[in-house]
Image (cartoon, coloured by chain):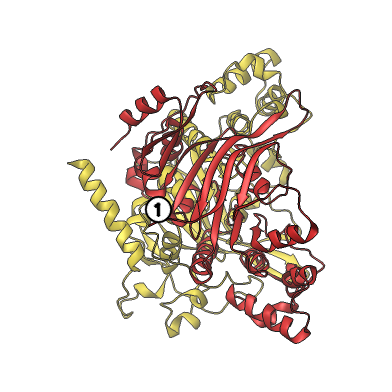
Chain colours: A red, B yellow
């Protein structure tokens, strides 16, 4: 089974601030995203996971490296037309459903804004039908098209955000903490919706979050990020059940589970960061399971891991 | 366990808010009690009344628009609802202290953290300033911050989020409170930091016998810290019991929904999460009957007519649902929740072997 690469990130660097003392938000990461999968990107706040997402979708000009989407360089010089074509293919869902919707536009206008920009569905009736179709696809109904953002609950707003992201029929969606601001029962609704839409439309997701149990649930593969670097990447089950990097182990040991008996005897594994030399790179410890470090360190970690 | 001292007893607490849209019944008859050295977790979604309940204990509900419509809050036998603001000031921070969600906003950015701690100590105890400083440094040390003498003279912006929350805890502990109310104290923090803060709170509780009311929407955190759990929905406690009662033998369909909507690490990615359809009711006009009926797949005709009473499941376990009535049909707990409980039991058995 050969998997088709939809996105390739090669040595991506995103530095902020002055060139003399840059803040290295993303410091040389490489990974691939395959068509139709969900790649979860996890890490603590400030580790660079959101920056990675925003760099991929061209919200930042990258410092170094290459982002190749469907064979084309994302950050290369592009004409207006090329940029538009790219924007149709890749869309984003944001964290805060309160801040990401324009309060002066109705849900219908928010969803249709992309149509205006890209000159689609110029026929009014056709456009209306498309808006209805999108609203229904995300579990809202037609009457909602004429309402303003403040008339919706948090979960419903996030559904509008999803409908907007879907409006141009993208193939790749970056979801930046799409459920963090929602209540538990609503989180499950939105996650189920994302899964269902993926199945129906063959979407590929980059799912950025800090809630590890939700990421495990939604992702096929997971990348663990820390201080601007991806430390470990692999299949979701492998990362959770056979973590290799000490940071991943520490992170996993901190997740509280809804099981009081096991919680009572939980021992958190503290993490002490060891600087790795510049020669550090990715080593494959298992099939599709890569760990960042020097050869000797990775061998040592791989030996010590819990089977 | 008869010698346990009751610290708080809340009886039929009702709190309303006057708004332009009408009277919002935010808390609709809440009863619970808390013993010395115990942790009670109040779980619920936003708008369920959990924060209003905890603020009410501190008498932090602004009046107007808030109204204490009925009920008693007995703290050490005294009814806090009847106290004047002046009497309350003596209790606040002294006997009852509170930790808020956001450590970024609950500290004063223009004041050194050391002074923010001594301020509380000097407010409630008369002692020389030098002694208060010593106590503050000792507290900073106790909450696990290295170099307490140096940290004493720093401003909040020089601390990370987790460290700030530790300072907030130090302030809360400054006057040796009998009751600590923690309103989502770890929601704004990363998981690793959250785990550290929870460890710290449990450790402090062990040494000081403080009772804790822990408000959260994260069931994982509840499983970690709580002795007993109260699940709130639409301004009422719908299920109440020990942490094992709630997690291994839940009786209320809302609790099933909450447990089912949270994935655990063994969830099969192919199956959808169990969700609670719809959204919580508008508390300006609470629905007739059971407030959860409209979202409850097991709702019966009576749920729309009459509010269920608290049914007793065991000595420690209560639930407010008609499903527990002897005449109600047997409803099996959703498979996804049942399966998870079985897996936990299996793991437990493995561990004990």
The residue tagged with tag 1: helix, strand or loop?
loop
On screen, residue A225 versus residue A257, left or right, reads right
Which chain is mark 1 on?
B
Q: Residue at x 69, y 22 (%)?
A: B114
Q: Residue at x 44, y 48 (%)?
A: B220
Look at the picture and state if B69 lies above or below A52.
below
Other residues around mark 1 within 10 Å, as few (<14) / some (14–19) / many (≥20): many
x then y, percent, for residue B60: 68, 49
x then y, percent, for residue A201: 53, 70
Q: Residue at x 35, y 72 (%)?
A: B324
**Closer to the camera in the image, B285 or A42:** A42
Look at the picture and state if B171 lies above or below B141.
below
Residue B321 lies in what quarter of the image?
bottom left
Q: Quadrant of the C terminus of chain A?
A: top left
Residue placed under numbered mark 1 in the picture: B264
The reply to whether residue A43 is in sight is no
**Closer to the camera in the image, B238 or B249:** B249
Of all residues, the one furthest to the left in this rendering is B353
């Amino acid at each position: 089974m050969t998997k088709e690469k939809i996105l390739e990130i090669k040595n991506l660097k995103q530095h902020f601030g002055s060139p003399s003392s840059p803040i290295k938000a993303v410091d040389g990461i490489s990974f691939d995203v395959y068509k139709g999968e969900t790649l979860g990107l996890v890490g603590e706040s400030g580790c660079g996971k959101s920056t990675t997402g925003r760099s991929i979708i061209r919200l930042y000009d990258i410092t170094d490296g290459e982002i190749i989407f469907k064979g084309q360089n994302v950050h290369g010089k592009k004409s207006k037309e090329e940029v538009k074509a790219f924007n149709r293919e890749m869309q984003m869902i944001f964290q805060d459903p309160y801040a990401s919707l324009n309060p002066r536009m109705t849900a219908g206008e928010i969803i249709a804004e992309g149509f205006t920009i890209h000159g689609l569905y110029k026929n009014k009736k056709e456009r209306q039908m498309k808006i209805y179709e999108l609203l229904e696809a995300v579990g809202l109904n037609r009457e909602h098209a004429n309402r303003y953002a403040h008339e919706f609950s948090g979960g419903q707003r996030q559904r509008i955000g999803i409908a907007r992201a879907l409006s141009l029929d993208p193939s790749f969606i970056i979801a930046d903490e799409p459920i963090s601001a929602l209540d538990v029962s609503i989180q499950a609704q939105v996650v189920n919706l994302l899964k269902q839409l993926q199945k129906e439309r063959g979407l590929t997701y980059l799912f950025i979050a800090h809630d590890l149990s939700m990421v495990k649930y939604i992702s096929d593969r997971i990348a663990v990020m820390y201080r601007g670097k991806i430390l470990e990447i692999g299949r979701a089950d492998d990362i959770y059940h056979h973590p290799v990097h000490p940071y991943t182990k520490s992170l996993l040991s901190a997740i509280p589970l809804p099981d009081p008996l096991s919680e009572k005897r939980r021992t958190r594994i503290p993490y002490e960061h060891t600087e790795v030399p510049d020669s550090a790179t990715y080593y494959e410890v298992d099939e599709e399971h890569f760990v960042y470090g020097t050869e000797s360190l990775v061998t040592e970690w791989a030996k010590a891991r819990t089977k | 366990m008869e010698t346990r001292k009751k610290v708080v007893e809340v009886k039929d607490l009702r709190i309303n808010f006057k708004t332009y849209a009408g009277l919002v019944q935010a808390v609709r008859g809440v009863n619970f009690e808390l013993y010395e050295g115990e942790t009670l977790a109040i779980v619920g979604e936003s708008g369920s009344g959990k924060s209003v309940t905890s603020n009410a204990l501190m008498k932090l509900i602004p009046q107007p628009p808030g109204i204490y419509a009925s009920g008693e809050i007995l703290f050490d036998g005294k009814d806090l609802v009847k106290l004047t603001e002046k009497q309350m000031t003596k209790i606040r921070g002294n006997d009852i202290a509170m930790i808020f969600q956001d450590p970024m906003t609950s500290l004063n950015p223009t004041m050194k953290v050391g002074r923010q701690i001594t301020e509380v100590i000097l407010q409630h105890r008369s002692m020389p300033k030098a002694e208060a400083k010593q106590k503050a440094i000792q507290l900073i040390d106790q909450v696990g911050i290295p170099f307490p003498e140096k940290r004493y003279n720093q401003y909040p912006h020089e601390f990370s989020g987790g460290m700030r929350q530790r300072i907030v805890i130090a302030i809360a502990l400054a006057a040796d409170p009998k009751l600590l109310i923690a309103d989502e104290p770890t929601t704004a923090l990363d998981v690793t930091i959250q785990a550290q803060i929870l460890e710290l709170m449990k450790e402090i509780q062990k040494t000081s016998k403080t009772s804790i009311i822990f408000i959260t929407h994260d069931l994982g955190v509840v499983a970690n810290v709580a002795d007993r759990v109260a699940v709130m929905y639409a301004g009422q406690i719908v299920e109440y019991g020990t942490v094992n009662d709630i997690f291994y033998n839940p009786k209320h369909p809302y609790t099933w929904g909450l447990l089912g909507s949270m994935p655990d690490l063994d969830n099969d990615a192919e199956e959808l999460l169990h969700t609670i359809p719809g959204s919580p009711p508008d508390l300006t006009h609470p629905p007739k009957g059971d407030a959860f009926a409209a979202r409850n797949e097991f709702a019966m005709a009576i749920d729309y007519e009459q509010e269920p009473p608290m049914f007793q499941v065991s000595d420690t376990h209560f639930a407010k649902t008609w499903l527990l009535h002897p005449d109600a049909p047997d409803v099996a707990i959703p498979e996804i929740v049942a399966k998870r409980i079985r897996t936990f039991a299996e793991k437990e058995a493995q561990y004990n072997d």
